[in-house]
Amino acid sequence: MPDTMDLELYQEWRDTKHAEAFAELAARHAPMVYSVCRRILSDPARSADATVEVFQLLAFAPEGPRRNLASWLHTAAVDRASSHIRPSDKRSREKKSASSEDAGLTNNIDSAIEQLPWRFRVTIIGQFAEEKTLLELAAETGVEHARIATNAVKGIESLRKLLASAHNLKLSASRLKEFLDTNLVEPVPSYLVSSITERALADSAPGRRLAAGFSVDESSDGGGGGKILMLAAIVAVIAVMAFMFWPKGGDESQQGQIQATSPADSVDASSTPDAGTDKPGGRERVVARPKDTTPAQPVATSISGTGRE
């Protein structure tokens, strides 16, 4: 079983529900999952609870990982740990992030990784969290080795630029690799390793509830999990609503200008006694009235006037 690939073990669990297959997956990936939760939450107890929830998701998700299990688990860990964040956690994280470069990296590295396309996430998580070679990643994902090697280089560069633009963490590629190599995984409490499988499989209801609406985009260009896709959808809806309800000021004034300059109806608004005015929004606007084209009637020469009855 130690030589069996992750997705083969996962498929065995789905097909047979053998607890041994699931326990092997938990033993392999608990260090990475717990480390993600610990960086986000700091508190060991809540980090352990979030870790168990991640494996509940894995056990009972209607659609689990299809291309790479470790990157799927990373997305799930960020999702579950983020759900446990308290307002005091946010304030503490912001304060720590400003204190040093390492603290800023610790607090923001996982969310930054989740913003990368899947093809880059796989190489970063595989190399630095799972300690796998590029050849092993190529075999697992079905992507040719040359492409995996290219993605590994581009992934580091994309992550470096993202950290600089989003979090003002300006690092060299070698400095970023050093941090990933030494800080991405930490030891898991022994009690947690021995209890993950039992706790995760004890009741299917929590796992199915957590899995509702959760998904991971495993297409090559896919980024992050369902929450990122949801955010993009919300932004799109706001843009459409803004377009629909944007004030259409100026339409009436444009129509008035068209009437005023029409050859048949044009008048000099400044010299016409019966021209009306309107002041929407405190700005005077001349409303031109059509020229009277009624034929003039003959008038007696003894009556003085303007030539109009």
Image: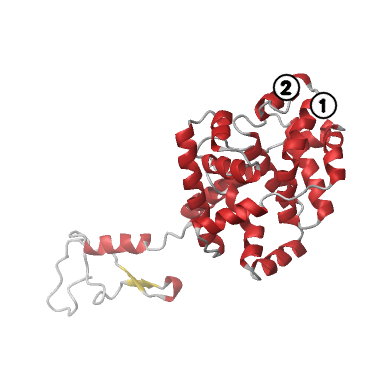
Q: What is the quadrant of the N terminus in the image?
A: top right
Q: Secondary structure at mark 1?
A: helix
Q: Residue furthest left?
A: 301
Task: Mark 1 or mark 2: name the one nearer the start of the chain.
Answer: 2
253 above or below 110?
Answer: below
Quadrant assignment, res 266: bottom left
* Spot occupied by residue 271 in the image (x, y as percentages of width and height): 23, 77
Residue 225 versus residue 69: which sits nearer the camera?
69
Residue 112 versus residue 99: which sits nearer the camera?
99
Residue shown at 57%/45% (left/top)?
124
Relative to residue 38, is residue 217 drawn left or right? left
18 above or below 237?
Answer: above
Residue shown at 85%/45% (left/top)?
190
1 above or below 230?
Answer: above
* Spot occupied by residue 275 in the image (x, y as percentages of width and height): 31, 72
Kind of residue at badge 1: Ala
Q: Secondary structure at mark 2?
A: helix
* Spot occupied by residue 134 in the image (x, y as percentages of width and height): 54, 37
Kind of residue at badge 2: Glu
Camera sees residue 242: yes
Circle 2 residues within 10 Å: few <14, some 14–19, many ≥20 = some
Relative to residue 153, is residue 129 drawn left or right? right
Q: How many marks?
A: 2
Q: What is the quadrant of the C terminus in the image?
A: bottom left
Q: Which residue is mark 2?
A: 12
Please give the label number shown on residue 19. Answer: 1
Relative to residue 252, is residue 303 drawn left or right? left
Please give the label number shown on residue 83. Answer: none
Camera sees residue 292: no
* Spot occupied by residue 61 in the image (x, y as percentages of width and height): 72, 32
Residue shown at 71%/55% (left/top)?
39
Quadrant assignment, res 204: top right
